[in-house]
């Protein structure tokens, strides 16, 4: 039995929706939420909603309304398409608006900073800081250093209990090269990562080979990222960031 026109129309809609969903997913993963950041920031939920609208809701709606020769059929299909485009735009905007913009080394760890994490009061204090121009194609690595002025130090210490910390203050950001020495001195050895992740020993053992860095030179530092904390791999010889992984970085 040949498939009906209704089934064919729904199947075509499904194929188009699947391609669009795949392209959107690839763009989000590769552009805004690379590596382990996608899972750590709860971004899978809005992405799953987008995929559901494109792959399930749209084709089902087409199957329901498609009757060859039906009066107003074109209008129905256009409305379905526009609703899908609106859902896609809303989902992508939600992901873009919450995207990671900086991975900041502070004291002995990395902190993930997302769009909207800078309070208005700190933006005003930052003046013309170049770090107020937020990247749009993935997070940039930077550092943050405590100021030397006593008044500002006391202000930061006073704000710490409120949840406002150094990585929320772009006026104290410095280029990543300025904190490389600190990263090198603070980086933990892979052996500690193995102890923290006993079920992942094989994956951790493979990291030096996969990244082209000798095992004795490959280290890590913890990163606070939202839903869960991550481990940032670094080359202990020069402080170079190798990548961000989903391994548990501390107890």
Image (cartoon, helix red, strand yellow):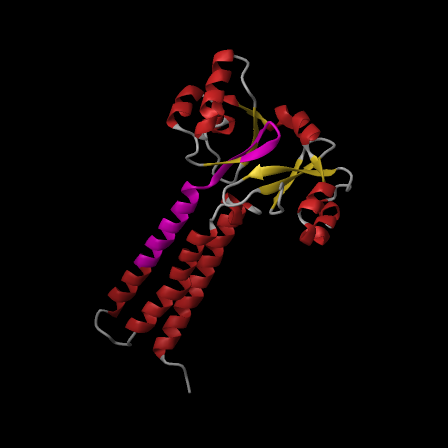
Left or right relative to 89: residue 104: right
User: Which residues make up the magenta segment?
Assistant: 82-111
Q: Where does the image place residue 187, in percent across and percent down from the top left?
A: 68, 33
114 is higher (above) or lower (below) than 180: below
Q: Is residue 165 left or right of residue 207?
A: left
Q: Residue furthest top?
A: 150
Q: Is there any visible trace of residue 167 in the rendered image?
A: yes
Pick out the residue farthest to the bottom. 1
Please tell me whether residue 100 belongs to the stretch shown in magenta.
Answer: yes
Which percent across, then down, holds residue 72? 22, 69
Relative to the observer, which residue lies in front, 4 or 61?
61
Left or right placement of residue 222 versus residue 189 in this view: left
Q: In percent of the image, x 44 and y 36: which residue is there?
A: 115
Residue 188's image quarter?
top right
Quadrant of image for the N terminus: bottom left
Residue 169: horizontal and vertical position, in percent?
47, 25
Residue drawn at 66 percent across, 30 percent down: 183
Q: Is residue 107 above or below residue 51?
A: above
x and y percent of residue 164 in the render? 45, 28
Query: 223 or 44, which lies in front?
Result: 223
């Amino acid at each position: 039995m040949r498939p009906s026109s209704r089934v064919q129309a729904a199947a075509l809609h499904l194929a188009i929706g699947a391609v669009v969903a795949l392209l959107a997913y690839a763009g989000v993963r590769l552009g805004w939420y690379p590596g382990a950041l996608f899972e750590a920031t709860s971004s899978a939920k809005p992405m799953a909603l987008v995929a559901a609208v494109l792959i399930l809701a749209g084709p089902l709606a087409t199957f329901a309304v498609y009757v060859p020769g039906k009066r107003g059929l074109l209008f129905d299909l256009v409305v379905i398409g526009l609703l899908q485009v609106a859902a896609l735009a809303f989902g992508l905007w939600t992901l873009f608006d919450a995207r990671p913009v900086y991975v900041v080394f502070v004291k002995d760890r990395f902190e993930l900073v997302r769009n909207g994490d800078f309070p208005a009061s700190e933006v005003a204090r930052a003046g013309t800081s170049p770090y107020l121009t937020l990247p749009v194609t993935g997070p940039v690595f930077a550092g943050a250093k405590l100021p030397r002025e006593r008044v500002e130090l006391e202000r930061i210490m006073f704000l710490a209990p409120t949840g406002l910390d150094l990585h929320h203050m772009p006026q104290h950001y410095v280029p990543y090269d300025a904190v490389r020495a600190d990263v090198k001195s603070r980086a933990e050895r892979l052996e500690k990562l193995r102890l923290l992740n006993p079920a992942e020993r094989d994956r951790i053992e493979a990291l030096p080979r996969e990244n082209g860095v000798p095992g004795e030179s490959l280290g890590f530092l913890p990163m606070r990222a939202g839903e869960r904390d991550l481990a940032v791999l670094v080359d202990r010889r020069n402080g170079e960031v190798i990548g961000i992984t989903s391994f548990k970085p501390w107890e």
